[in-house]
Amino acid sequence: MRIEEVENILLDFYDGKITESQETMLRDFFSTHDVPDYLEKEKRFFLSLHSLNQIPEPEGLEEKLIHLIDEKGSEGIKVLQRNHSRRDWRWISGVAAGILLILTLGVSLTILGLRDSRPKDTFTDPREAYLVMQNALIEVSANLNNGIDQLTEAKKEFVEINNEIKEEIQ
């Protein structure tokens, strides 16, 4: 067989398009002929494939593998089984929490419903209410003015400090 034919059959082999007889021809070619350096890898590959067919299979290997697969399969089933008691407790605690929430909400609404939600008058005399409100607003105004005065003083101090820093930098 010529090298060009071997190369074409190799291309078909790697594409998976050869027959068993062509594969046997390649194996025979590589085992009986000297090949160029660029085909040396293919020669080692085909000779190793041929040597794999000559390795004896240990006795009982298939039975051992089937037994091992069955054992691992049953272990996997045990791992995947759910803990029913834990699931039951979660379900029971969820129901209990829901009932407790509903009861708490019902009691809260009942207590709030008993109260009169309308505001009640604290003053019977409108003039007295006006005087109390006027005094409260005067106090708020005084505190607000005091705060504004403090902010103004702080701003003056801040400007003075900035000016001193600028003078030091220059």
Image (spheres, rainbow, N blue to C red):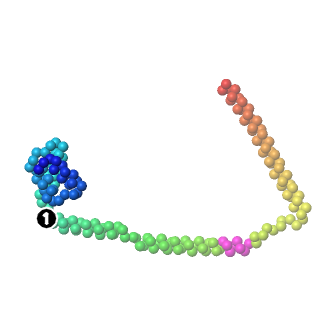
The residue identified by callout 1 is 59
The secondary structure that most of the magenta stretch takes on is: helix
- Picture quarter with the C terminus: top right
* Residue 140, position as x, y percentages in the image: 81, 51
- Residue in the image at 79% along x and 44% along y: 148
Q: Horizontally, is 23 left or right of 68 in the view?
A: left
Inspect the magenta stretch and tell me whether residue 114 lies in it.
yes
In magenta stretch: residue 14: no
Direction from residue 109 to residue 67 in the image, left or right: left
Q: Residue at x 55, y 71 (%)?
A: 97
Q: Is residue 54 left or right of residue 92?
A: left
The amino acid on which the numbered mark 1 sits, given as a three-letter code, is: Glu
Q: Name the residue at 13% across, 56% down.
A: 24
Q: How far across and how far down the image is residue 22, in percent?
A: 15, 56
Residue 120 higher or lower than 165, as above or below: below
In the rendered image, the vertical position of residue 167 relative to residue 104, given as above or below: above
Q: Secondary structure at mark 1?
A: loop
* Horizontal arrangement in the rendering, residue 149 relative to residue 89 (left or right): right
Across and down, in percent, residue 76 comes to 32, 67
Q: Which residues are magenta?
A: 108-115
